[in-house]
Image (cartoon, helix red, strand yellow):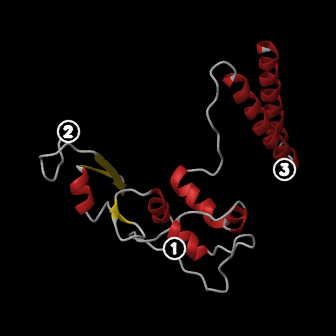
């Protein structure tokens, strides 16, 4: 595939944007990608490097894109007690300073992760052989928490249905073992 801009060199940078359910694809060579201001990121050293991961992450934090994160008062901004990193430093670099930063910036990270991945819970991959058992165990856990809520809300018909589903899944697990 040739570069859409110069039509001479092979395209090595492929960008897909979805804005308001409208998909736009751009295929550029390295040189045209560096010249294109829409997709090139500036690194702290003044050189243009397409797609540096820390710049990509800071884009999700609202820096240098079409929207901005609502600025907080300087006194309200959290600071890591272990390494001293501030929220402003985090948004500039896109990197956390230490493990404690995950706890300090938890609220901000949660919204960013939801924006990137759609969820904050990591499911991971399931092995093909035992994946069915793991899914069933997860489902049982979910159903048990729903059962507790139904009992507390005194929705006994729903609780009975949930109890039966749990028993069914537990029987399936015993058969598979």
Mark 2: few/some/many CA within 10 Å (<14, 14-19, 20+)? few
Q: For mark 2, what is the residue?
A: 1
Left/right of residue 1 with respect to residue 59 in the rendered view: left
User: Is disc 1 placed on a helix, strand or loop?
Assistant: loop
Residue 164, image x and y in percent? 81, 27
Per the image, label 3 sits on a secondary structure element best described as loop
Which of discs 2 and 3 lies nearer the camera? The answer is: 2
Q: Residue at x 20, y 39 (%)?
A: 1
**Which is more toward the observer, 57 or 85?**
85
Residue 38 vertical placement versus 162 (above, below): below
Using the numbered discs, state the Cα–Cα distance from disc 2 to disc 1 in whole angstroms: 38 Å
Q: Quadrant of the C terminus?
A: top right
Q: Which residue is mark 3?
A: 153
Q: Is residue 6 above or below residue 1?
A: below
Q: Position of residue 79 (x, y in %)?
A: 68, 76
Is label 3 in contact with label 1 (beta carbons under 8 Å)? Answer: no
Q: Which mark is residue 69?
A: 1
């Amino acid at each position: 595939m040739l570069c859409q801009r110069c039509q001479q060199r092979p395209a090595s940078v492929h960008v897909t944007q979805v804005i308001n359910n409208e998909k736009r694809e751009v295929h550029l060579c390295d040189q045209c990608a560096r010249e294109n201001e829409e997709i090139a990121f500036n690194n702290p050293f003044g050189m243009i490097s397409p797609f540096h991961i820390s710049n990509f992450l800071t884009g999700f934090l609202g820096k240098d894109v079409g929207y901005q994160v609502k600025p907080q008062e300087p006194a309200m901004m959290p600071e890591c007690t272990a390494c001293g990193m501030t929220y402003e430093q985090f948004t500039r670099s896109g990197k956390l300073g230490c493990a404690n930063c995950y706890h300090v910036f938890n609220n901000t990270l949660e919204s960013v992760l939801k924006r990137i991945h759609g969820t904050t819970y990591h499911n991971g991959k399931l092995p093909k052989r035992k994946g069915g058992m793991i899914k069933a165990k997860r489902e049982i856990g979910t159903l048990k928490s729903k059962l507790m809520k139904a009992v507390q809300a005194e929705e006994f018909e729903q609780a009975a249905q949930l109890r039966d589903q749990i028993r069914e899944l537990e029987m399936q697990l015993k058969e598979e073992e």
